[in-house]
C-alpha cells in the first residue's frame, strides 16, 4: 500500500514539475516542496523500518516540517493581514509545542508524537476552513476554477481523517498489529485520494499569458 | 480480545468517516456561499455598468441633438453671412469656418465614442478597425492588431465591456504615455479570450497611482466578465496589459 502512495505522490510531483511555469504563476512552489518531502519521508520511513525496526524518527521529523509548510503555503496566497500574521504565530506555536513534546515528553526516538500531530491537524483544519471561507467571499470567479480551492479542499479532507487516525496511533498500536495495519492502510487510501485531488488543482492552474506579438 | 479490537477499529473508522463527511459538507457550503456571492456581485456590477451605459447614451444624444444641431446652425449662419463680407475678411472667415467644422467633427467623434452603435450592429472586429483608423489618423500613432479565432461574435455586453477596456487603455496611451506604437493581440482558445495590449510609451503606473479611475474601471469590467487583468510596466520602456476572460458564463450576460 505504501508503495502505491509513494508512486502516486511521485506522479503528482512530476506533473507539478512539468507545469513549473504555471505553478510559479499561481505561487504554488511550496506545494511541490511539500510533495517532495512527503515522498522522502515515506521512503525514509520504509528504510528506517528495515534497518532500525522503527519509522518513528522519520514521521516525527516530517510532522515538524509538514504543518508549517502547509501553513506557509496557505499564507503565501493571502495578502499581509491579521490572518496571515495569525498563520505565522500558529506556525511558531506549533514548532515550540513539537520541541516540547519530542524532547521533554515522548522522546524523539521513543514514540510517535501524538499531541503534536493532533495540534498540527487542528491548526491546519482551522486555517484551511478560515481560508476557504475567505476565498468564497472574496473570489469573483467560481472557486472551483481556482487551484487554491482544490488544494485547500484536499488538505481539509486529508487532515480531518489524518488528525484522528494519527493522533490515536499510540492507542492503535497498543491494540495489536492487525488493528494498526488496518488503520494505517485506511489512512494511506485517504492520503492517495487527496493527493490525486491535486491533479484537479493542476488542471485549474492559470496559463502563462499568451500573445500573438 | 478480538471483539474489543474490532469494536475499537470500528469506532475509529466511524469517527474518520464522520469527520470526512463533515469536511465534504463544509466544502460544499463554501462552494454554495461563493456562488451566491458571485451572483449578487454580478447583478450589482451589471446594474452599475448598465446605468453607466445609459448615462453615456443620454450624453451622446444631448451632444448630437443639442450641441451638434447648434453647431450645424452656426455653420449655415456663417455661410449665409460670409457672402456679405468683403474680400479683406475672407481669410478670417475661412479660418472661422474651418474651426466650426473641426468642432463639429470633434462633437461627432465624442458622441460616437460615447455610444458605439456600430458595435451592436457589426461587432468588436469592426469597431477595432475603426479604432485603428482613428488612432492612426487623429493621433498619428501606429496601431497594429492581430486576432486569432475571433470570427464568431460574443454576446453584446461582453463585446461592449472588452471594447470599453481597450478604449480606456488607448485613452491612457494617447493621453499620458507618449507612445508612438500600440500593439494589440486577441486570441480565442475556445476556453478563454486572452488580450495582450502593449505600447512603447513611458508607462502608466505612476498615472495609475495618482488617479486610478481608468485602470480600476478596467478591473471592474474584467471582474464583471469573470476575468482578470494584469498590468506590467517595463521601467519606463513601455506598458503591457494582459486581460483574460473565460468564455464559460459569458452567455449569461
Image: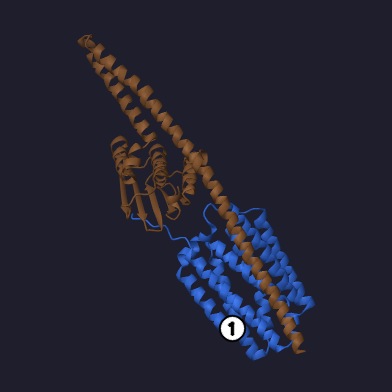
Answer with the quarter of the image where residue A94 lies: bottom right
For the rendered model, the colour scheme is by chain
Q: Which chain is blue?
A: A
Residue occupying the point 54% across, 43% down: B44
Q: Which chain is brown?
A: B
Quadrant containing the N terminus of chain B is bottom right
Asked if residue B127 is positioned above or below residue A106 in the image, the reply reads above
Asked if residue B58 is positioned above or below residue B183 in the image, the reply reads above
Q: Is residue B133 visible?
A: yes
Residue occupying the point 66% across, 79% down: A59
Residue B24 at x, y = what percent?
Answer: 62, 66
Residue B245 at x, y = what percent?
Answer: 43, 52
- Chain of the residue on which disc 1 is drawn: A
Q: Residue furthest right?
A: A105
Residue A144 at x, y = what percent?
Answer: 53, 60
Number of residues whose C-alpha sits closer than 10 Å to that of mark 1, classed few (under 14), some (14–19) or many (20 or more): some
Q: Nearer the viewer, residue B119 or B182?
A: B119
- SS for dot 1: helix
Residue occupying the point 46% across, 48% down: B222
Q: Is residue B120 left or right of residue A163?
A: left
Residue occupying the point 61% across, 58% down: B30
Residue annotated with mark 1: A2
Q: Is residue A43 left or right of residue A21?
A: right
Q: Is residue B85 left or right of residue A197?
A: left
The number of numbered discs placed on residues in the rendered structure image is 1
Q: Nearer the viewer, residue B148 or B171?
A: B148
Q: Is residue B150 left or right of residue A33?
A: left
Residue A130 at x, y = what percent?
Answer: 65, 59
Asked if residue A28 is positioned above or below residue A35 in the image, the reply reads above
Q: Is residue A112 visible?
A: no
Amino acid at each position: 500500500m505504501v508503495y502505491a502512495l509513494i508512486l502516486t505522490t511521485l506522479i503528482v510531483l512530476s506533473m507539478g514539475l512539468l507545469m513549473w511555469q504555471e505553478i510559479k504563476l499561481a505561487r504554488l512552489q511550496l506545494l511541490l516542496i511539500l510533495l517532495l518531502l512527503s515522498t522522502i519521508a515515506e521512503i525514509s520511513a520504509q528504510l528506517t523500518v528495515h534497518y532500525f525496526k522503527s519509522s518513528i524518527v522519520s514521521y516525527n521529523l516530517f510532522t515538524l516540517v509538514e504543518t508549517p509548510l502547509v501553513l506557509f503555503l496557505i499564507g503565501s496566497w493571502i495578502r499581509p493581514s491579521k490572518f496571515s500574521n495569525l498563520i505565522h504565530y500558529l506556525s511558531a506555536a506549533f514548532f515550540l509545542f513539537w520541541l516540547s513534546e519530542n524532547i521533554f515528553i515522548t522522546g524523539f526516538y521513543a514514540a510517535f508524537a501524538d499531541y503534536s500531530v493532533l495540534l498540527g491537524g487542528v491548526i491546519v483544519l482551522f486555517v484551511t476552513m478560515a481560508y476557504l471561507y475567505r476565498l468564497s467571499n472574496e473570489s469573483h470567479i467560481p472557486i472551483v476554477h481556482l487551484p487554491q480551492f482544490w488544494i485547500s479542499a484536499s488538505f481539509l479532507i486529508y487532515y480531518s481523517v489524518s488528525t484522528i487516525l494519527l493522533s490515536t496511533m499510540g492507542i492503535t498500536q497498543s491494540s495489536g498489529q492487525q488493528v494498526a495495519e488496518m488503520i494505517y492502510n485506511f489512512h494511506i487510501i485517504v492520503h492517495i485520494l487527496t493527493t490525486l485531488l491535486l491533479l484537479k488543482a493542476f488542471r485549474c492552474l492559470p496559463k502563462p499569458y499568451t500573445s500573438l506579438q | 480480545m478480538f471483539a474489543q479490537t474490532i469494536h475499537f477499529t470500528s469506532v475509529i473508522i466511524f469517527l474518520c468517516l464522520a469527520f470526512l463527511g463533515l469536511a465534504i459538507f463544509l466544502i460544499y457550503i463554501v462552494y454554495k456561499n461563493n456562488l451566491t456571492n458571485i451572483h449578487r456581485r454580478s447583478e450589482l456590477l451589471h446594474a452599475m455598468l448598465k446605468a453607466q451605459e445609459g448615462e453615456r447614451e443620454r450624453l451622446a444624444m444631448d451632444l448630437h441633438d443639442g450641441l451638434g444641431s447648434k453647431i450645424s446652425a452656426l455653420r449655415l449662419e456663417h455661410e449665409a453671412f460670409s457672402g456679405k463680407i468683403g474680400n479683406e475678411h475672407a481669410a478670417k472667415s475661412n479660418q472661422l469656418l474651418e474651426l466650426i467644422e473641426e468642432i463639429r467633427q470633434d462633437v461627432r467623434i465624442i458622441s460616437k465614442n460615447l455610444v458605439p452603435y456600430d458595435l451592436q450592429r457589426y461587432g468588436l472586429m469592426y469597431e477595432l478597425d475603426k479604432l485603428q483608423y482613428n488612432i492612426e489618423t487623429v493621433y498619428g500613432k501606429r496601431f497594429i492588431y492581430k486576432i486569432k479565432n475571433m470570427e464568431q461574435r460574443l454576446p453584446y455586453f461582453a463585446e461592449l465591456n472588452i471594447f470599453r477596456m481597450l478604449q480606456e487603455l488607448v485613452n491612457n496611451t494617447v493621453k499620458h504615455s507618449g507612445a508612438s506604437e500600440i500593439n494589440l493581440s486577441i486570441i480565442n482558445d475556445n476556453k478563454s479570450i486572452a488580450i495582450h495590449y502593449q505600447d512603447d510609451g513611458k508607462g502608466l503606473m505612476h498615472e495609475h497611482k495618482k488617479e486610478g479611475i481608468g485602470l480600476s474601471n478596467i478591473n471592474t469590467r474584467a471582474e464583471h466578465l469573470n476575468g482578470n487583468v494584469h498590468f506590467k510596466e517595463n521601467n519606463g520602456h513601455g506598458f503591457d496589459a494582459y486581460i483574460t476572460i473565460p468564455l464559460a458564463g459569458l452567455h449569461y450576460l
